[in-house]
């Protein structure tokens, strides 16, 4: 779950960005409401990129953050 406002922080997410991938980029996360892309990735011959439409630190569960970061790092390091 994504927090709207972080406890102890002045950062609040008023609007989440929906990102529409252009091929060959592809969606990696979707928002539950509206089924719109919350994150996209691209894997090219010479570089890779991964973009989220919300601040990573707004993911409330530490376990979820660790799992997602491991997946992102795996995406960048896989052969």
Image (cartoon, rainbow, N blue to C red):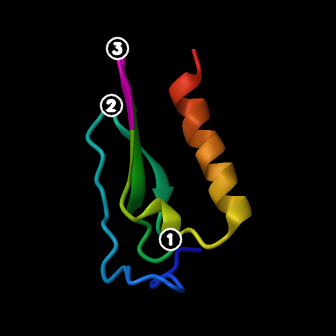
In this rendering, the answer to whether 78 lies above or below 16 is above
Name the quarter where the C terminus is drawn. Answer: top right
Query: What is the number of the mark on residue 46?
Result: 3
Residue 35 position within the rendered picture, expressed as x and y whole percent measured from the top left? 44, 67
Labels 1 and 3: the sequence-earlier one: 3
Task: Name which residue lies at 45% across and 85% down.
Answer: 5
Highlighted range, magenta: 43-49
Mark 2 or 3: the one toward you: 3
Q: Secondary structure at mark 1?
A: helix
Which percent across, then down, holds residue 50? 41, 41
Residue lying at 50% horizontally and 81% vertically, measured from the top left? 6
For disc 2, the marked residue is: 24
Q: Can you say whether 39 is above or below 49 in the image?
A: below
Please give the name of the residue rendered at 65% of the width and 42% of the height, measured from the top-left corner. 70
Name the quadrant containing residue 9. bottom left
Label at residue 45: none
Residue 2 belongs to the span the image colors magenta: no
Q: Which of marks 3 and 2 precedes in the sequence?
A: 2
């Amino acid at each position: 779950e994504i927090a709207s406002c972080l406890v102890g922080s002045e950062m609040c997410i008023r609007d989440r960005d929906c990102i529409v991938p252009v091929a060959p980029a592809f969606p990696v996360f979707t928002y539950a409401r509206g089924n719109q892309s919350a994150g996209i990735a691209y894997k090219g011959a010479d570089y890779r990129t991964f973009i989220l439409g919300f601040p990573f630190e707004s993911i409330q569960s530490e376990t979820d953050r660790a799992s997602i970061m491991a997946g992102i790092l795996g995406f960048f390091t896989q052969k």
